[in-house]
Image: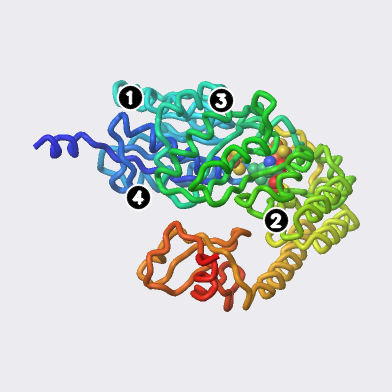
């Protein structure tokens, strides 16, 4: 009877997440928060009493996507009680008032650093259904409040936001305006949250920040935090993203030297361009030479390290020669993965006022860039065939006798098996693969030898 009453009172929340992993972390934390006001996660939009769009503003059409999605929800709920609609994330921060004015179906906009007030806003809307706009910046208050709620993410590979905001102000980027100034969380708080994640089954932790290697709390830097987190027994792997070349200090390079076996030998280090002229115009605060120096030092301390990167193609002022320099850098470093985007003028950023280069030229350059990056990636992936990879298994593939995991370089690997491999690390002989997935076989002999050792 009591259970039936509880189920009747229980409401459902659906969150659609766009953008970076920090938004994924925030969405997980919203699910944790709303439990205390009796909302439970649902994957079925039709059943939602509350629909949240956790948005990203990094490139164009972000706001259009919000209106488009709201249109779909309106259609879905036509003739029925509408769900509470909340827009969170970076579009909410940047365009809050405009969204509320234009789309009366939206009940609230909540910026990334006001998320901790989510429950209060829902209760207000339930009571009086007035539109709410919360876009203040208070990262400390956000995390102080979130600390009261256990992180219940139960993935084998979990995210942990250690740092918010950015003080770099690259001329093209909205992040300093949507996420505010750099803020780092205390180490003890992070170690505690990590232990919670481990108790839920996490084996791999990815430390997150818009500028993760700018992490600094009471003079403790990212390297100290990694060392502390490595001490947690059941954590097998540590990753972090996204780093900035300017903050790649010697102490961080040094931990790759030897002692840290849990830190994966794979670093995402965005460079954006291979031309010093463009890097300066972007206000990136580093040169191509600085970037190469970091790569070389890291390769020297640990030759197994591989890199991925982000590139902006067609930045205002980019000439054919600047673009060729970018291709040269790509070929020189042999990134195993690249994310490339045509420059998108973001409202309110200094670069939005610059004269854009011809869009067709940018498109052609992007195709050349991506073809070159794909060739390098394919060559790298072929080099893995018939070699052994260390794979941490995350989940069973739906409706198949297959298990999915990732190797140290975050490559997706699938093996055929009936065994439940969740949370286990196995040596896998890679047999084949395509651009997205590697296919392998568990090497029983190698794994036995490993346990005997
Ligand atoms: N903090 C990271 C860094 O320093 O590179 C990246 C953060 S940003 C969320 C992810 C990527 O989006 C950037 O590396 C950049 O390549 C891309 N990006 C950001 N603003 C952009 C814009 N206005 N146009 C095109 N790409 C953009
Ligand atoms: Fe954006 Fe990264 Fe530059 Fe910060 S460092 S402004 S997040 S691109
Ligand atoms: Fe997008 Fe905001 Fe992340 S703009 S990339 S969701 S920090």
Name the mark nearer the viewer: 1 or 2.
Answer: 2
Camera-side residue of 375 and 388: 388
* Disc 2 to disc 3: CB gap under 8 Å: no
Q: Earlier in the sequence, mark 2 or mark 3?
A: 3
The residue under label 4 is: 43
Give the position of the C terminus as an image quadrant: bottom right
Mark 1 residue CB less than 8 A from any atom of ligand 3:
no
Mark 3, secondary structure of its residue: helix
Whole-percent x, y for residue 246 in the image: 79, 39
Residue, x 54% and y 63% (percent of image)? 391
Circle number at residue 139: 3
Marks 4/1: CA distance?
22 Å
Mark 4, secondary structure of its residue: loop
Q: Quadrant of residue 166?
A: top right
Q: Earlier in the sequence, mark 2 or mark 4?
A: 4
Marks 2/4: CA distance?
32 Å
Q: Earlier in the sequence, mark 4 or mark 1?
A: 4
- Image quarter where ligand 3 lies: top right
Mark 2, secondary structure of its residue: strand
The residue under label 2 is: 308
Marks 3/1: CA distance?
22 Å
The residue under label 1 is: 123
* Disc 1 to disc 2: CB gap under 8 Å: no
Circle number at residue 422: none
Whole-percent x, y for residue 62 in the image: 57, 43
Residue 345 visible? The answer is no
Mark 1, secondary structure of its residue: helix
Marks 2/3: CA distance?
29 Å
Name the mark nearer the viewer: 2 or 4.
Answer: 2
């Amino acid at each position: 009877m009591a259970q039936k009453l509880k189920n009747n009172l229980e409401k459902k929340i659906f969150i659609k997440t766009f953008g970076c992993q920090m938004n994924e972390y925030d969405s997980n934390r919203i699910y944790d928060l709303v439990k205390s006001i009796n909302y439970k996660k649902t994957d079925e939009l039709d059943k939602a009493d509350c629909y949240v769009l956790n948005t990203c503003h990094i490139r164009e059409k972000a706001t259009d996507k919000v209106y488009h999605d709201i249109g779909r929800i309106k259609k879905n709920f036509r003739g029925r009680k509408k769900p509470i609609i909340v827009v969170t994330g970076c579009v909410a921060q940047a365009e809050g008032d405009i969204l509320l004015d234009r789309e009366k179906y939206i009940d609230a906009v909540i910026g990334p650093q006001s998320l901790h007030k989510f429950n209060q806003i829902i209760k207000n809307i339930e009571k009086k259904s007035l539109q709410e706009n919360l876009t203040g910046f208070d990262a400390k208050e956000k995390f102080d409040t979130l600390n009261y709620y256990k992180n219940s993410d139960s993935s084998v590979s979990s995210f942990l936001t250690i740092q918010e905001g950015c003080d770099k102000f690259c001329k093209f980027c909205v992040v300093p305006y949507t996420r505010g100034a750099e803020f780092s969380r205390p180490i003890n708080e992070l170690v505690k949250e990590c232990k919670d994640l481990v108790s839920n089954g996490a084996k791999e932790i990815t430390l997150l920040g818009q500028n993760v290697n700018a992490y600094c709390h009471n003079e403790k830097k990212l390297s100290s935090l990694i060392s502390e987190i490595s001490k947690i027994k059941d954590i097998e792997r540590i990753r972090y993203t996204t780093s900035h070349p300017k903050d790649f200090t010697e102490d961080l390079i040094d931990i790759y030297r030897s002692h840290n076996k849990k830190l994966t030998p794979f670093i995402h280090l965005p460079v954006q361009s291979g031309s010093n002229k463009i890097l300066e115009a972007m206000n990136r605060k580093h040169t191509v030479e600085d970037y190469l120096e970091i790569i070389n030092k890291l390769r020297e301390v640990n030759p197994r390290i591989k890199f991925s990167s982000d590139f902006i193609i067609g930045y205002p002022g980019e000439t054919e020669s600047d673009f060729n320099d970018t291709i040269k850098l790509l070929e020189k470093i042999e990134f195993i993965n690249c994310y490339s985007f045509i420059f998108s003028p973001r409202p309110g950023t200094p670069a939005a006022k610059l004269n854009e280069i011809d869009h067709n030229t940018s498109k052609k350059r992007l195709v050349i860039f991506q073809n070159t990056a794909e060739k390098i990636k394919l060559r790298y992936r072929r080099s893995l065939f018939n070699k052994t990879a260390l794979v941490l298994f995350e989940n069973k593939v739906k409706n198949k006798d297959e298990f999915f995991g990732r190797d140290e370089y975050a490559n997706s690997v699938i093996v055929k098996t009936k065994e439940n491999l969740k949370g286990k690390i196995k040596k896998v002989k890679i047999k084949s693969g395509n651009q997205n997935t590697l296919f392998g076989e568990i090497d029983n002999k190698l794994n036995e030898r490993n346990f005997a050792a």
